[in-house]
Every structure is written in C-alpha cells, then in structure tokens.
Image: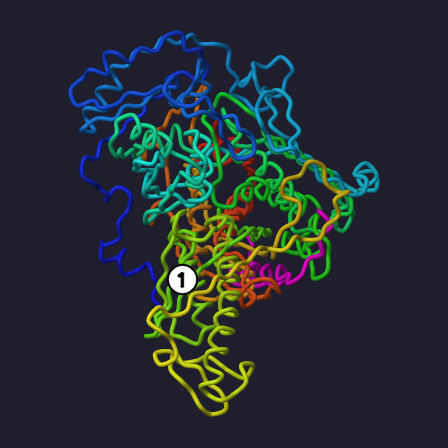
Amino acid sequence: MVRLDGAPKVRGEAAYLGDRAVPGLLHGVVLRSPHPHALIRRLDTRRASVMRGVRAVITAADVPETRYGIYIKDATVFARHRVRFAGEAVAAVAADTLEAARAAVAAIEVDYEPVPAVFNAEDALRDDAPLVHPEWEQYDAAPILVRLGNRSTRGVIRVGNVEEGFAKSFRIFEHRFTTAKVHAGYTEPRGAIGFWDDDGSCTVWSSTQLPFAVQETLADAVGLPSSKVRVVATTLGGGFGGKLTVGVEHHAVLLARSARAPVKVVSTVEEELTSSLPRQPAIVDVKTGVDRDGRILAKQGRIILDTGAFSGSGPQTASSCTNTLHGPYNIPNVLLEGVSVYTNNITTGAFRAPSGPIGNFACESQMDIIADSLGIDPLELRLRNIFHEGDKGPSGAVLAAVGLEECLLRAADAIGWNERRPGKDRGKGIACGWWMTTGMTSEVDVTLHRDGRVVLNSGAVEIGTGALTGAAQVLADDLGVAAEQVTVIGGDTRDSPYDYGAQGSRTTFCVGNACKNAAVEMRRALAIMAAPVLGVAPDVIELRDAAAHGDGRSIPFAELLGDEGVKVRGVFTAPAVPHEASRLENHMSPAWHAPSFHAHAVDLSVDEDTGDVTVHRYVVAQDVGFAINPTYVEGQIEGGAVQGIGQALFEEIVSRDGIVQNPNLTDYKMPTMQDVPTVETILVQYPTAHGPSGAKGVGEPPCIEPPATIANAIAAATGARVPTLPMTAERICAARGQIEA
C-alpha cells in the first residue's frame, strides 16, 4: 500500500511550518543567555523597541508569572531574575523581517552577575552543591516524585535480596558506563506561528508531535484555560521525541499578542543544539553477580541522569532506565535506582526510546564482559538468562508473546556468529533488549460516505513513520473497503478527538485499536440500516467490497447511506498491566504494555592505526508482534538502527562549563550514507493479545541496541572495551593504550 502521506511529500506539496505564511506575518527571534548560571541585574529593551521594523519586545515582565513542566512545573517562558543554562530564553522580538528582529535582539542590554554553577550530575547530588533551583520546594510536582535539592526524583526497583545474591555468586562484576547528550536529528527545526482571535483565544500552528500536550502547556504558559488554546499540527519534518513538548510555541503566541499580528518563530541550527531537548547524558554504575554457569544471581545498579536546568521528561526516563538496565533477563535479586538530577547544562528531554540506549549500553556491554571472563560464548550466556513465555518482568508483570530467543538465534545466524573474530582487527558483536508499547488513550472519529470514502479523524500526528497509514489499513480491513479509500485528517485540538500523541511506539497500536472499536460501531450502525433492506437479521450482515452483504444479497454503501454518510467514534485506552507494587518505590514506569523483544548483530573492523570503525554488516531481528505493513516496519527498523549507530560512534553535544562547543552540523557529527551499511531486517512475529492484529510498538526499539552491539564488536576486534559513548576513534585508541585517554 502507498503511504497516505507519501504522494504530497514527494511532490513537494506538503506544507511544513516553514512553508506557511499569512498576510501581515511577523518574524520572531529569541534572546538567549550566554551564561550557564547568573542573576539578571538589569534588562533594558528600550533601544531595541524603537528600532525600524520592530513591532514587539517582550520579557518575563510582560508574561504571566506561571510555571509549566511535564512532571514538575519548574520552567518559565523567559528567565525571571535568574538564568540557569546558557541558551535559556531571556527576551524575544517580533519584527517585519527576520533581519530586523535579529538586529533588535542584539540591541537588548542585559547585565548578568554570574553565580556558582554545577555541571556534573554526580557533583550536583553533593550536599554542598550549588542549587540550580533554590526555590525547588515551591514548585508543583507529581506526588510520586521524591525530590531533594538538585535531585528531581528517584525511582527504585527492588526484588529479593541483592546482598544474599552476591554472597552466593561465583563472580561479581562492577563497571561504570557513561553516555552523552545527543540531538534527535530531525531535518525540520522546531517552529510555530501564533495568532490571537477577537474573543481572547489563541491559535498556534506547530511542528509538534503532541498537539494536546502542547495545548495544556501553552495554557499554563500564557495563563489561559486550555479551551481557549488551539493547536494545529502542521506536516512534520521529523520528531523522534524532540518535538513532544513546547519548543517555541509560547514565544510565538506571546509575541503575537503583544504585536497584535501573527508571528512566526523558527529555531536556528545553533538554537537546536544549545536550547532544544537532546537525550539526557547519564552515568551508569552496575554490579552483577553470577554463578559458575553464568546465570545471573543478583544485579545492583544506579543511573544518574543529567536533565540539565529543568526536569523535563527526566523523572520518567530515570525510572524506565531501570528496566533497560535490568535487561530482558530472569534475575532473582535486584536493586536498581534511577535518579534525575538538575545541572546548569542545557535542558534535555525525550529522544526515541528514552532511556533505552542508556541502560542497554551498560547492561549488554557488561554481559559480554562477563561472558569473556567466564569463557562462555556471549550468545550462550544470553540464552541461559533471557525471558521466556510466562516469566515475570522486574515489576512482577507476567510476560507473554516473548520472541526473544528466536530474535537472538536468527540475528546470530544471519551474521555468521560461529566465526566471532573473522580476522585481525575485525569482530562481531551481539546485543539484545526489550521495550515498551506506550498505552494511554486514543480517540478517532470515522465517517463513511456514500461513495465508499472513509475519513479518519485522529488527534495523532503523522511524524514520518507511516503509523497512521497502518491504522488506516486496520480500519479499512475491518470495514471491508480498500485502504486507498481512507483519508486521514486531524492533529487539531479543536476539530479532532483526543489522542495522547505520536510517541512511545504507540500510534499504530493505540490508534489502530481505536479504529477497530470504531469499526465495531460502524458495522453495528450499518447492519441496523441494511438488515430490513436485505430482509435478514443484523447479526448476519457482513461488510466487504464497499457493500453490506447478507443471505446471498447485497446493497452498496452508495444506495444505503444518505448524503452525510455515517459517523462514529472509536475509543481505546490501554488497560493497566497487573504487577507487584511491592517491588517498586516511586517508580514512574512500572509495567510495560505489550513489550517487544529484539536482537542486533554487527560485523565491523577497526583501523589498527587510526581507530576508525567500518561497519560491514548490520542485522536486526525484531519481534514486532504482527507486521501490519512489513515495508514500513522495515523502514522504521533501518532508520532506527542508523540513529543508534550515530549515537554509538559519532554523535555528542560537547559542553565545557555549560557552554556547547559544537553548535553546528559541521562539528556535531551525524552519520551519512557513507558511514552506515545496508541494515538487514528480520521480522519476528509473536502476536500480542492487546494490539491490532497482534501488532506491538515498532518505532523506538531499533535505536536501543546499536551502541552495545557495536561496543561488543569493537571489543572482539581489538580486545579493548570502550565504556563511554560515543566510541570515537580517539577513545578506541585510548582504550587500546595507543594514546592517552
């Protein structure tokens, strides 16, 4: 099936935020702090406000004194009295041209008084560390959070008794791993156009993944009830989690109110790399005890997550990181904690499979270390410990549809695992993992017209994955119409039903289930209409080929329906997953819906002199539940693996004392087609009872395992273990002792 969003994109007809313009449109630019931590002693906008073409200049004094945030309301539209990271918004200008706005921003005078700052998350937990938020106790926060000073929360998984487990262990392994900040790498920067209506309500066109979440945050930021805030999602040029929350929407809307005209604000590349929401960097300590056969008896670990100046998605990510550090293994004794920490670094956020690569890199790197130390094949070590059908996950949830063993065996076979070190400086690596399918609520409105056309209205946004095409296929199949007859609209908080949003590998799963429920309602309505015409009972009516059939007779929809067609609503809310609450303390990601399982394998070589890595083959075997559209599933796997390779080998936002050193796409190294091989995909299908046709979430998992997979292959090729991401050529040479670390 052709993707429903494909044709307008390849023809250049899709209207992205940057393509949109309206009469009288002004351009907005944001002034950002050059200091990571400072008091604002004086802020003078007078010279800027009288410059030619300037229509509005706003600061914290011009906006409501409100705070917003996902789990902790700790953020403000503009810095008020204090800046907490280099890149925080201090003021904004709207002008007739972009050049005039930039000139006015440069004319704003700010006197800063630098104050002590903290840049290392471990240091930030010290009792004598400078407080990023001296007033942290005054913030509204989710009740589950356990906060103290620079710690925004701490989530714990506790199973059995780790001390007893370690006492019974034959060997105990302790290691530290670190990961870096990485940008989501979407092609289109964050952008928004803000408008105000005569009734005091506002509208924003936004390049967002979550229109309803942005609506709620904007309501807090601008001091309006959410019913007075409308968010319309434009065609999205990639998101990968980086566009889940407010980026520049609040600046566009507040500038528009002050200027009394529509205002467009679009981030520059420098702003993307200094003030967006990259993946959190982390410090991971893990201690694992095993018996003589390599079976894990105990695991203890701590993840310290640097969320930067504001908490963002950090509290939830820290909790879910304990699940990925645990890994897809049966472990009788566990004590894992995830801690999210404020620093004066740039604020971080969600990025495709938040926490996934962080915990998996540590877990799976250590599994290879254990295997080599015990003289056990790394594949065999994993097979001795992995989850199987009916096992319990770390929260005590019973696992079903577990395809992990098949994934491992097929990935290993595809890479030729029997020859792990095929030559000098050449090695193969393998890693496995598991991930969630995010639940929550999706609603859809479905209208069937006389000509057989079906309009699917969803609050979800098509972010480039083809997920809504998959949902449309589910709907078409259940209604007995061709998938090409379905049109998808939506992403509008005023005109679309609610959706939790395009995030967490949930869109096809949740919207598809809502479509199935809508189809039930549609079939019921059509059966009641067709039954008297066909002279049969409603329960024998079947829908296929755009017609109602019963007892050998049929009537086309064109003859059955009126001019307005039939409209129904479908709703799906993922059911709670039973688990053992006694295993958890203040944990925000306790049990995963329809978890997926996956294994990656790689064949690579490392240049003996330079440390450069060449990836020859890369294989992904992923349990997708059921592949509704195999082509698009494979596309997601290929793209995710490439993103993971980027995190493994190249990508890092480098900061020194809170200042980003590489705020451009020359020095921030994302992989190109010359850097990656063809990704070979193996679709493993263990259908879940909860997904449409058994489908599980697909989009996030492929980026989880590449760092560990590549780390294990580098170790096999060189004998050197690199415990830090990215594993650059310099770090590989340092690990081999060729240069100083």
Between residues 422 and 496, which one lies in front from this camera angle?
A: 496
Q: Position of residue 476 (x, y in %)?
A: 43, 71
Between residues 52 and 273, which one lies in front from this camera angle?
A: 52
Image vertical order of residue 154 relative to residue 422, above or below: above
Between residues 96 and 83, which one lies in front from this camera angle?
A: 96
Image vertical order of residue 159 relative to residue 392, above or below: above
- Name which residue lies at 56% across and 46% down: 712
- Name which residue lies at 34% across and 62% down: 4
Q: Position of residue 480 (x, y in %)?
A: 44, 76
- Name which residue lies at 47% across and 51% down: 498
697 drawn magenta: no
- Name which residue lies at 42% across and 28% down: 654
State the scheme by which the image is colored: rainbow
Residue 649 in sight in this render: no
Amino acid tagged 1 = Leu
415 drawn magenta: yes
Q: Position of residue 294 (x, y in %)?
A: 73, 49
**What's drawn in magenta, residue-wise?**
395-422
Q: Position of residue 148 (x, y in %)?
A: 64, 22
**In the rendered image, which residue does mark 1 sit on?**
456
Image vertical order of residue 588 relative to residue 42, above or below: below
* Secondary structure at numbered mark 1: strand
Left or right of 390 in this view: 639: left
Task: Please tell me how many numbered marks the rendered image carries.
Answer: 1
> Image quadrant for the N terminus?
bottom left
Q: Quadrant of residue 90?
A: top left
Tell which residue pokes out farthest to the bottom in this image: 552
